[in-house]
């Protein structure tokens, strides 16, 4: 076919063939270069900070697929050199070894020298990793890259960042890119006045402490008006953060209040109905927590795939186990001591010591680990508030348990009998209510509620023989402050004490805050001995 083609067609075909050849050759050379960065990583073996910085720069522009992994390992002090062969390895967080030159899995020798880094190199690594992952397929990695650049404000990443911004389609990622660019613009001397003003507006809209730090880094060469705008934005951010801090303290207080309510709600029932000062109530919480541990160990041994369901099984099991233990304590000891509160206090204190020692004998004195299910792990951000899933589920569980308890007391025969005995024991007995049976069921019911509290506390506290002692004093404070036997008073006092404690802790410290609240509670009881919401029916017996 060549003889029938003119010179122009032949030239065009030759040029096309040459172009394809060049492209293929270039692609092959790039692929080879990207796959092997042995020359770059060999600089790590020199044990020189300047050589390490040069290696970071060359690895960043190499295009190697595993370049980000190598630099990430370097930042975590997981890059090593074989002193005998000068071979460079990097390891993952799990300890798997790879060749730094090619990224291939390898078996590293035992004797390795770690590559030294300093703060300047760490800053270079953050910027390099950010540049490498700006165009990653995973949006989470792109956001992480933008945050890295935001922290370092490395001007060398600006071109890569602006290039990634033009291609970004995810709105959330694009916002992070814009914030990182704004931080660089403010710290760069050559930025124009209009660019700085736009950057200040972007960072003011972000409104967190990191944005305030970026605004404080505005370059010294800016005019006074731009500085005033930056200072105004910083003041707005600080005011917003102060408001968020107040709201965060309220949330932490509600979270603490829910824990106090869980620990105290069973005590409110037994103390209110029976007038028994049960010093072993904390140990019922402890038994509930250990029941959760045992149930989880059974799931871990026989059904590891269903471990997240262990908490749902632990709830009724903890209620049943602690309820039976409570009934045994009431039938075996407490029923012989009614009307003698001091002896009841001493007897239940002795029972608490026995239960603690029994747990130490069976499970040992060390803390036991209870794994949180997947739906209770992690946290999420809500309007600037950091909310953990575990705490949120505990608050919801506490409110649901409180509502169920109110329904049980008002809509079941046992609940009506408990209320009758609470208001006037002698009158209830004369009406045919078996008060000993009600006492046993009430004590078992209150102990079962304490067991449910132990299930919840196992997710946020150490499961140990001393778990109950942490909450017994707080439980009595909640019950006495709210009004003995009044569930609504227990609810209000638990959340009130929780919020007050969280607002006092930053000022006075955790220990002094609790002492201060205890003093205030003593003064309050002097004025209102029956608490916030006293049961009027109990005055009939007085």
Image: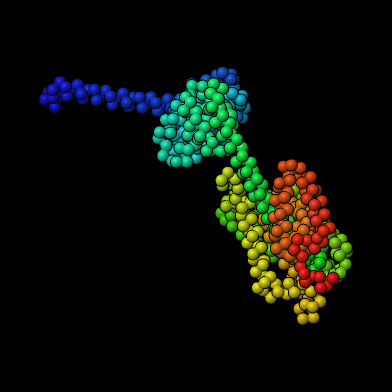
Left/right of residue 99 with respect to residue 369 in the rendered view: left
Colour scheme used in the picture?
rainbow
Residue found farthest to the front: 225
Q: Is residue 215 visible?
A: no
Q: Quadrant of residue 27?
A: top left
Residue found farthest to the left: 4
Query: Could you tell me residue 114's position as x and y percent?
Result: 61, 26
Query: Could you tell me residue 6's position as x and y percent?
Result: 13, 22
The quadrant the C terminus occupies is bottom right
Residue depicted at 61% across the width and 24% down the height: 118
Residue depicted at 77% across the width and 81% down the height: 431
Numbered-mark total: 0
Vertical comparison of 381 with 298: above or below = above
Residue depicted at 45% across the width and 36% down the height: 136
Q: Is residue 251 visible?
A: yes
Residue 44 versus residue 190: which sits nearer the camera? 190
Vertical comparison of 258 with 163: above or below = below
Query: Could you tell me residue 182's position as x and y percent?
Result: 50, 31
Residue depicted at 25% across the width and 25% down the height: 17
Query: Could you tell me residue 145's position as x and y percent?
Result: 50, 34
The quadrant the N terminus occupies is top left
Left/right of residue 503 with respect to residue 119 in the rendered view: right
Q: Quadrant of residue 493?
A: bottom right
Left/right of residue 264 with respect to residue 224 in the rendered view: right
Residue 427 versus residue 329: which sits nearer the camera? 427
């Amino acid at each position: 076919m060549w003889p029938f083609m003119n010179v122009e067609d032949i030239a065009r075909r030759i040029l096309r063939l040459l172009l394809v050849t060049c492209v293929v050759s270039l692609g092959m050379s790039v692929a080879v270069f990207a796959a092997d960065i042995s020359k770059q990583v060999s600089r790590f073996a020199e044990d020189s900070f300047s050589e390490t910085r040069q290696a970071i720069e060359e690895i960043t522009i190499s295009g190697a697929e595993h370049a980000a992994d190598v630099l990430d390992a370097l930042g975590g002090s997981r890059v090593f050199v074989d002193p005998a062969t000068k071979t460079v390895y990097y390891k993952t967080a799990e300890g798997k070894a790879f060749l730094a030159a090619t990224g291939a899995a390898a078996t590293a020798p035992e004797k390795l020298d770690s590559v030294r880094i300093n703060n300047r190199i760490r800053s270079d690594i953050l910027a390099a990793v950010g540049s490498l992952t700006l165009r990653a397929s995973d949006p989470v990695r792109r956001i992480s890259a933008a945050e890295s650049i935001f922290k370092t404000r490395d001007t060398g990443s600006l071109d890569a960042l602006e290039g990634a911004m033009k291609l970004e389609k995810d709105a959330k990622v694009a916002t992070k890119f814009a914030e990182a660019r704004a931080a660089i613009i403010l710290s760069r001397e050559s930025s124009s006045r209009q660019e700085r003003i736009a950057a200040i507006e972007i960072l003011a809209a972000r409104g967190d402490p990191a944005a305030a730090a970026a605004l404080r880094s505005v370059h010294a060469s800016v005019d006074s008006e731009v500085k005033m705008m930056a200072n105004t934005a910083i003041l707005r951010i600080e005011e917003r953060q102060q408001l968020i801090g107040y709201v965060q303290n309220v949330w932490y207080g509600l979270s603490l209040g829910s824990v106090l309510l869980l620990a105290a709600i069973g005590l409110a029932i037994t103390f209110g109905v029976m007038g028994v000062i049960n010093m072993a109530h904390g140990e019922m919480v402890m038994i509930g927590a250990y029941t959760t541990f045992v149930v989880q160990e059974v799931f871990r041994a026989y059904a590891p795939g269903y471990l997240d369901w262990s908490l749902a099984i632990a709830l009724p099991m903890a209620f049943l186990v602690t309820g039976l233990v409570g009934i045994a304590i009431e039938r075996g000891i407490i029923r012989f001591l009614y009307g003698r509160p001091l002896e009841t206090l001493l007897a239940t204190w002795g029972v608490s010591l026995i239960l603690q020692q029994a747990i130490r004998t069976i499970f040992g004195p060390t803390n036991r680990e209870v794994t949180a299910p997947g739906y209770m792990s992690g946290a999420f951000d809500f309007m600037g508030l950091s909310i953990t899933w575990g705490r949120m589920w505990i608050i919801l569980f506490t409110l649901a348990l409180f509502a169920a308890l109110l329904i049980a007391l008002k809509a079941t025969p046992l609940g009506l009998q408990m209320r009758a005995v609470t208001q006037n024991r002698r009158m209830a007995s004369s009406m045919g209510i078996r008060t000993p049976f009600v006492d046993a069921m009430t004590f078992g019911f209150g102990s079962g509620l304490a067991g449910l509290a132990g299930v919840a506390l196992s997710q946020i506290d150490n499961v140990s023989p001393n778990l109950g002692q942490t909450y017994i004093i707080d439980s009595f404070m909640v019950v006495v402050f709210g009004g003995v036997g009044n569930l609504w008073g227990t609810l209000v006092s638990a959340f009130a004490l929780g919020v007050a404690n969280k607002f006092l802790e930053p000022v006075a410290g955790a220990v002094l805050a609790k002492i201060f609240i205890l003093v205030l509670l003593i003064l309050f009881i002097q004025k209102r001995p029956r608490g916030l919401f006293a049961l009027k029916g109990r005055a009939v017996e007085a």
